[in-house]
Image (spheres, grey):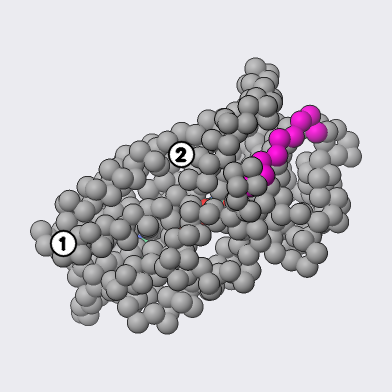
Amino acid sequence: MKTIKADVVICGGGLSGLICSLALSRYGISVCTIEKSRHNIQQTKDTRSTAYLLPSINFLIKTGIWKYLSKNINPLRVLSIVNSKNGYPFNQVLNETQFNAKEISKEYFGYNISNYETKKILMKLVKRDKLINFIDDEIISVENFKELLTINLKNKSMVKTKLLIGADGRNSFIRNYYNIKTQITDIDQKAVTFIIQHKESHNNISYEIYDLGGPFTTVPLKSKEEKKSAVIWVNDSIKIDNLLSLKKFELQSEINKRSCNKLGEISVISDLQSSNVSTQLAEKFVDHRMILIGEAAHALPPIGAQGLNLTIKDISVICDLIKKYSTSIGSNEMVAEFNLKRLIDVKTRTTSVNILNKVSYSNNVITRKARDIGLKVLQEVKPIKYLLMKFGLG
Ligand SMILES: Cc1cc2nc3c(=O)[nH]c(=O)nc-3n(C[C@H](O)[C@H](O)[C@H](O)COP(=O)(O)OP(=O)(O)OC[C@H]3O[C@@H](n4cnc5c(N)ncnc54)[C@H](O)[C@@H]3O)c2cc1C
């Protein structure tokens, strides 16, 4: 039986676990990252992309990670919210409200990067980092002692550590192991993601197009002539399952219709990837020498690019606390301070995203009318609009 030692153990080598490992290593902390799926970089390409907002980018610059990611990025200059209704061959635009980064004196809101590229780069950095021990294995149990934890792995190795970080996703083993309950809001939605090529340039605009059942969002990707975007289409499960069963030409026609012709003629150039959409919020983020981050702590519907951006805030707080509690990493005081610092912010953002999602999902005439009025108010009452834009950035 092999025994390994590390200041911090991270369970999960998804985006949250990889970014957290690299950030902690930059602070001189020894990290053991444990990932159970051998092919963490999926053989089938992840077609999702992530919009990194400015505060996240600032943190990634500070930790020296950004310079490796910044080759494949596309800026997000404008967010355009479109209200639409059924039409042929394209749905009809009822109204459109644009949020331009310039309105809050920024050049961009952030940058969009494909998850596949990001993971590939982060894995490379992790594997060559001397302070990170990346292990292909699965955590199966944790033994609690006052001054340290013993983490037991499936291959019978043990890791002794001062702090365990659960970054093991929606169905977190660590969260369940510590018996932490989650609040789940599930309105039977799914998301389908894919990449499109379009005739018109995206002009660094992200369109969030609302109709019955949820938003159809295009996010600009880096490409020649700005003619590639990632799409996230959220709708009720039946609609998404129907879409997945369509023949390619039928699917293209549905997508073109739903896009309101905002980007000219569209062709799908990737596989379709679908996932369930629900909100999950852990009732607390910590326990004895343990902190939950990422989707293990908070999983949100893909609206307003909040998911991974919230996680980067979690990681930034952990880095600050590691400095503050350098001689007592993982202590009760440290984990309690993390919980205090993150719970309210995460709850506020989860509530806002949930409200937005319910409003966008609703087929109810009054709710749809409220959405129309809300957008008009935002267009006319600039201070509220700017406040909302700043809140969205985090
Ligand atoms: C369609 C869609 C679009 C999105 N767009 C955005 C966006 O634009 N901006 C944004 O900020 N966020 C976005 N998000 C959210 C973002 O993608 C997620 O927050 C992020 O990918 C979650 O990463 P994670 O590392 O927390 O979890 P995961 O990716 O699920 O990783 C968890 C890892 O832990 C491993 N693991 C599990 N159990 C164990 C164990 N016992 N031992 C060892 N390893 C284990 C798993 O194998 C897995 O690799 C989007 C999400 C979706 C669904």
Where does label 1 land, which residue?
Answer: 328
- Provide residue 177's location: percent of width, then percent of height: 27, 52
Q: Residue at x 43, y 56 (%)?
A: 312
Give the overall secondary structure of the magenta segment: strand
Q: Residue at x 62, y 31 (%)?
A: 382
Mark 1 belongs to which amino acid? Answer: Ser
- Provide residue 254's location: percent of width, then percent of height: 80, 44
Query: Label 2, label 1: how many angstroms apart (C-alpha)?
Result: 31 Å
Labelled pair 2, 1 in contact (Cβ < 8 Å): no
Q: Alpha-carbon neighbours of circle 1 within 10 Å: few (<14), some, or many (≥20)? A: some
**Quadrant position of residue 372:** top right
Ligand 1 contact, mark 1 (Cβ < 8 Å): no
Where does label 2 land, which residue?
Answer: 349
User: Looking at the picture, does residue 314 appear above or below residue 40?
Assistant: above
- Provide residue 330's location: percent of width, then percent of height: 20, 59
User: Looking at the picture, does residue 140 appear above or below residue 5?
Assistant: above
Q: Is residue 23 left or right of residue 95?
A: left
Asked if one can make out residue 363 in the rendered structure from this viewpoint, the answer is: no
Q: Is residue 193 left or right of residue 123?
A: right
Mark 2 belongs to which amino acid? Answer: Arg
Q: Residue at x 52, y 46 (%)?
A: 393
- Provide residue 171's location: percent of width, then percent of height: 41, 51
Q: Is residue 98 magenta?
A: yes
Q: Is residue 119 magenta?
A: no
**Quadrant position of residue 325:** bottom left
Which residues fall within the magenta stretch? Answer: 93-101
